[in-house]
Amino acid sequence: MEITRIPNKVLAKKVKEISVSEIKSGSYKELISDMRKIMIENNGVGLAANQAGKDLSIFVIDNKLAEESNVPDAFINPEITEYSKETDETEEGCLSIPDYWAPIRRSKKIKIKAIDENGKKVKFKTRGFLARVLQHETDHLNGKTIKDRANGK
């Protein structure tokens, strides 16, 4: 499995949601496992399915970050339901855009809901670095990259 890079069209469109019955059947366990591996091999902190060439609403995040925050490391059909008005700007990079870094403004706190890889609904508030990673990966699933953000799209 290779990392999909821009200008691949799968990175520029909103991905397909997955049914809960498909999730519970375990159909995506192998893909999620492969995504974790390529994220780690490429020193990433998150990886969306479309970055692995798949038109699916899934992303994974660094296991240590997930454990520290007591959240899952795989998110299916995620939706950010609330963004704080308070923002900050930090430089971000992206595995799909090698050697490109840009200052990206994001909400400091968010509320997110998703389904974990076992089909269980999760919903929580978070802040700081985890909030930034979740916003970055959710952007991917909506067809938006940091290059789009940096260019005001």
Image (spheres, grey):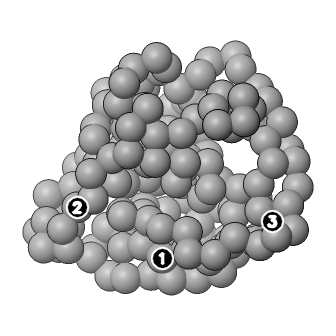
In what element is the residue under mark 3?
loop
Q: Earlier in the sequence, mark 3 or mark 1?
A: 3
Asked whether 30 or 147 is in front, the reply is 147
Residue hosting label 2: 18
Whether residue 115 is situated above or below residue 35 in the rendered picture: below
Q: Amino acid at mark 2?
A: Ile
Give the alpha-carbon distance from disc 2 to disc 1, as whole Å.
14 Å
Crowding at mark 3 (Cα within 10 Å: few <14, some 14-19, many 20+): some
Image quarter in which the N terminus is found: top left
Q: Quadrant of residue 61?
A: bottom right
Reply above or below: 69 against 6: below
Work out how far the residue at label 3 is from the one at label 1, CA to CA, in angstroms: 17 Å
Instruction: Give the image quarter of residue 95.
Output: top right
The C terminus appears in which quarter of the rendering? Answer: top right
Residue under circle 1?
113
Q: Contact (CB < 8 A) between labels 2 and 1?
A: no
Instruction: Tell me what residue is drawn at x 65 percent, y 80 percent.
Output: 125
Q: Is residue 12 left or right of residue 40?
A: left
- Which amino acid lies under the numbered mark 3 shown in the image of this protein? Lys
Q: Label 3 belongs to which residue?
A: 108
Residue 44: numbered disc: none
**Three-letter residue code for mark 1:** Lys
